[in-house]
Image (tube, rainbow, N blue to C red):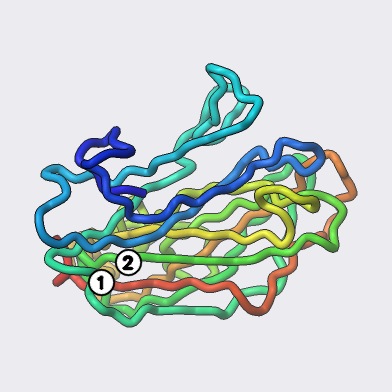
Amino acid sequence: MVLAEGPDDAAGDRVMPITDWRAQTCSQDLPHRNHHCVMALWGDRRISGSPVCQSCHVNLVVAAYHRQAKRGNVVVVGSDEDNGIVQDKGMLNAGVFKPGPPPAVNPLITRSRSRSKLGIGGPGSSGPKEVLYSQRINPDILRHEQLIVKAVATQKIGHLTFNVLMQSQLIVSDRPGSDRRAGIAAKVTSLGGVVSAQNGFNCTQGPSGHDDPCKIRKVGVVSLIKNAQTMPNRDLGPFVPLFVNLVVQNREIGIQGGWRPGDAARIPRRGGFIEVHRFGPEFHE
């Protein structure tokens, strides 16, 4: 990610890096073909002295390489389906604090998984949606607050005989175990409670860009557009808690076969978390 003067600037004097480059190899070799590869980047940059840009943009710069690539070959950004490329598979979010760096706040962190295994849907199904981690936000959330969220989760499939498509999303919900964005949470948050895009990758048994054990990384920003009250449109009623949930959906994929009802991915006790940095309305620009 870079800070740049124009929306198409990727390099040059008017570009300032926000993160380092991250490289990932997506495998096309069967049976451990990735097909989808997901990257999650987060970083920050403090600007001092003369401004880098007058009309600033945060740009995501991507480069793709293969030694056998020919002119006209492309990488699909999104999800390729028979009827075209499906968008809304990625997001670019930013929190801006002026003047100075992000203010010091104590993050809200949960490392307690909601379950030790996640079910896997069989051929022809989408798989069950299940909440793996949930972080409660106390019931005093005000309009113009910003929540910057990071999440990491690991799933193991080495005990299975097939690859697994793992999809995930960060949402704001009314309940800790809910995979839905309806209700007050959807009414009071930007983008109806969406914190990160719903996307995923093929977790493979053999070596690939996403091989077992597979790590999910999510990051996003959501802002409060109304007070989190029972009657938010009228600024009335008691305040209610909200929950940031990591929702995961698994299904069997590939040519190996062998899926059976009750098959599940295993979730290690340690290593996963949701981390929420809550910035009050006083930091809203």
Q: Is residue 170 left or right of residue 51?
A: right
For the residue pair 240 and 140, the one nearer the viewer reads as 140
Q: Position of residue 27 (x, y in %)?
A: 69, 40
Q: Is residue 208 left or right of residue 197?
A: right
Measured Cα–Cα span from mark 2 to mark 1:
6 Å
Residue under the image location 50 percent in, 34 percent down: 77
Q: Position of residue 171 (x, y in %)?
A: 45, 60
What amino acid is found at the position of numbered circle 2 in the picture?
A: Leu
What amino acid is found at the position of numbered circle 1 in the picture?
A: Phe
Q: Which residue is mark 2?
A: 147
Q: Which residue is mark 1?
A: 279
For the residue pair 163 and 232, the one nearer the viewer reads as 163
Q: Position of residue 8 (x, y in %)?
A: 29, 33
- Residue 149 is tagged as none
- Mark nearer the N terminus (2 vs 1): 2
Residue under the image location 40 percent in, 79 percent down: 108
Q: Are marks 2 and 1 in contact (CB under 8 Å)?
A: yes
Residue under the image location 9 percent in, 54 percent down: 50
Residue 105 vs 143, above or below: the answer is below
Q: Position of residue 24 (x, y in %)?
A: 58, 47
Residue 223 vs 35, above or below: the answer is below
